[in-house]
Image (cartoon, rainbow, N blue to C red):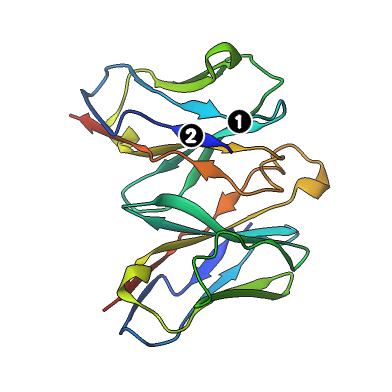
Amino acid sequence: DAGVIQSPRHEVTEMGQEVTLRCKPISGHDYLFWYRQTMMRGLELLIYFNNNVPIDDSGMPEDRFSAKMPNASFSTLKIQPSEPRDSAVYFCASSSPSLGLAGADTQYFGPGTRLTVL
Amino acid sequence: AQKVTQAQTEISVVEKEDVTLDCVYETRDTTYYLFWYKQPPSGELVFLIRRNSFDEQNEISGRYSWNFQKSTSSFNFTITASQVVDSAVYFCALSEAGGGADGLTFGKGTHLIIQP
């Protein structure tokens, strides 16, 4: 089975540009999470969705960040305008606790998108 | 508020040595879930184990073992007979929901270096 898919794997952009990161969760998973990893702050939750609805976006750093999940198989994280301090690795993860199956409560992570804002 | 502390920033051992990675957590909930993830040099996050607060049994999986002690709020991870391939950053994480239905709070990670 395919795992969580993220694109692009690497993104280099200039300050002020719009950046869109993409995620395809594992098929059948109804929870989707976006995390950010930096040296200073470590791994931190940005936002998560359940059945395509945002549940908690308290981790979104500021209004420049937005996330959407238009359907069960696709989510985007957008930064507009981007700034150098947004440089980080952005991870997407998915899970399926509602299935009640062994391991369903586990979050499985994608390979991440390494974002560099110059 | 929940918190995970991994006090060991970096550990370096020689291959075949046993090594224990410490994890101490804080939570006000009586129901919670603990996790360990591995991040190899390639960068992905690999799930290792999930444990709920009602199950204090230790777990062994091959060379890996985990010791969960509620009395000390610790969930330590031991690698027996370490190998170079074990070199990675290891993260301990906590969720006050099911783990699958809530965000994870991660520790800062322990960078494990296994020298040949």
User: Where residue B109 appears, x then y in whole percent?
Assistant: 38, 38
Can the viewer see residue A81 in this picture?
yes
Residue B27 has which mark? Answer: 1
Residue A118 at x, y percent in the picture: 26, 79
What residue is disc 2 on?
Answer: B4
Residue B22 in which image quadrant:
top left
Does B97 sit above or below residue A87?
A: above
Name which quarter of the figure residue A104 lies in: top right
Kind of element beneath mark 1? loop
Residue at image location 65% in from the left, 75% down from the top:
A68
* Residue at x 49%, y 65% (from the top left corner): A61
First in sequence, mark 1 or 2: give its number: 2
Disc 1: CA contacts within 10 A as few (<14), some (14-19) or many (>=20)? some
Can you give x and y, in whole percent of width and height, for residue A106 in the image?
Answer: 64, 43
Which quadrant of the rendered structure holds the C terminus of chain B? Answer: top left
Residue type, mark 1 in image: Thr
CB-based contact (under 8 Å), mark 1 and mark 2: no
Instruction: Provide the chain ID for the residue under circle 1.
Output: B
Q: What amino acid does circle 2 point to? A: Val
